[in-house]
Image (cartoon, rainbow, N blue to C red):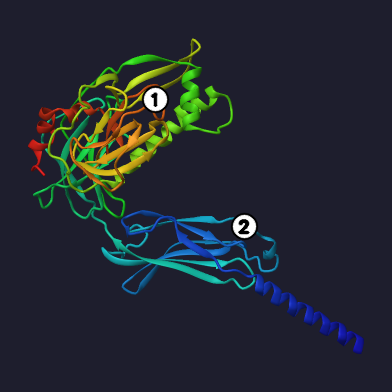
Amino acid sequence: MGKIVGVFLALILFLAAAFLVLRGLSSHSMLAFDSAPKAIGVDTPFVIRVTNPHGVRRIAAMIEQDGARVLLSETARPANRLTFWRAHLPAEEFHFIAGKNQDANLKEGNARLIVEAESNDLLALRDSISTDVDVIFHPPSVAADGLEHSINQGGSEMVILTPSGSFTESGVRIGDETFRSFPLPGSSSGRFALFAYAWDTPRDTVPTVYVKNAAGAEATATFRYKIFPKKFRARDLPIDDKFLEKVVNQIDPGGSGDLLTRFLKINGEMRRANNRTLADLRFKTEGKFLWSQPFLQMANSKVESSFADVRSYVYKGRKVDQQVHLGFDLAVAQHTPVAAANDGKIVWAAPLGIYGNCIVVDHGFGLQSIYGHLSEIGVKEGEMVKRGQTMGKSGSTGLAGGDHLHFSMQVEGVQVNPIEWWDQHWINDHIFNRMPRP
């Protein structure tokens, strides 16, 4: 009898120990919104990321307003209380919709989103995340100016728009590109946007102004415009081993593989990465015009390449690559002083891949000028420069065969033909005559 009691007590102790072990292995859930929610409308989608190595047996999303809580969505799974410790599950996403269509009593104002999760293990621990949101049902609206907008292919333009209602974002959309708007000087409600009609934008792409609120509701409007198509030059650009040795070993020292393979990677992958870096500099723009005169072209320069030249690279009689050159190549003499095309602020002054030693000057409201292949840089990021001020010297750094200046301009990260910005008449017609001078 004593032996049986001993075995029974041992079993109890074993089960108790096992329970304690399983209890200790139970885990909390980590919850995070995929993007921080700010507002909800009629039907606003949300994504919650849930991390728990054992998974969750229940997850529910609710909305709370004026003390009343309504269930929006719920997912339940069979309990796994004993073998959960074997599980090592990856994070998962929980999708739900919040808005008037899920809670008929919801009204405009403040509310709270709440998501609760219950771990799928012994203790079924509960965790939650919540956030305050604005409830907005009425969409915004927008109207554009009544002007006729003459837009050159590869060129720039400006439109004035008037949003109304609650909005958090507004601007111009052309295909996949969006261009932010800024408050119109001297106006309490008007805004304006500089935008670009890229060299390769299909002619049937319709530019629109848009406005969006925090709940994701969007309104759009069209405006009068006419596109003037441009024929861009196509040319063969012969390259040889001497050129490859110079540019490849300068840009990619210590790289592996043959020179041509390394060049093609530089000319393709690195070119795209460098252009993304340039485009992202739009986020460093000033919310005001820093300039008031036409932009300067490099004095007495010879144009070696124009904007949007389509270059076919020919190596040993064979076409090996094709790229588009988004700027002007301007040459004078070796190590010619390079002047700022206009007043502005330096937002980049450092090497940049195919552009070599590079300077980017911000002129405000998303308008920026780019100077590449420099042999010397004489300014620093954050420095203010004046129109005509020397910033460096021309050179052959980066993907350059000889000494020259690569000059380009971009509007909200989209590179455009600088010719318009060199022209006082164009600037007056398209910019200054439509808004107060800075």
| Residue at x 9%, y 33% (from the top left corner) | 428
Quadrant placement of the N terminus: bottom right
Classify 348 as above or below 374. below
Around disc 1, counting alpha carbons within 10 Å, would you say few (fewer than 14), some (14 to 19), or many (20 or more)?
many
Name the residue at the bottom extreme. 2
Residue placed most toward the observer, 430 or 166: 430
337 on left or right of 37: left
129 on left or right of 410: right
Report the disc number at residue 106: none
Around disc 2, counting alpha carbons within 10 Å, would you say few (fewer than 14), some (14 to 19), or many (20 or more)?
few
Quarter-wise, where is residue 24 in the image?
Answer: bottom right
Report the disc number at residue 400: 1
Residue 168 in sight: yes
Residue placed most toward the observer, 85 or 329: 329
Q: Upstream in the sequence, badge 1 or badge 2? A: 2
Q: Are marks 1 and 2 in contact (CB under 8 Å)?
A: no
**Residue ID for mark 2:** 89
Name the residue at the top extreme. 317
Classify 388 as above or below 50. above
Residue placed most toward the observer, 316 or 38: 316
Q: Position of residue 98 (x, y in %)?
A: 37, 58
Quadrant placement of the C terminus: top left
Q: Secondary structure at mark 1?
A: loop
Inspect the image, locate mark 1, and give the three-letter code of the amino acid beneath it.
Ala
Inspect the image, locate mark 2, and give the three-letter code of the amino acid beneath it.
Leu
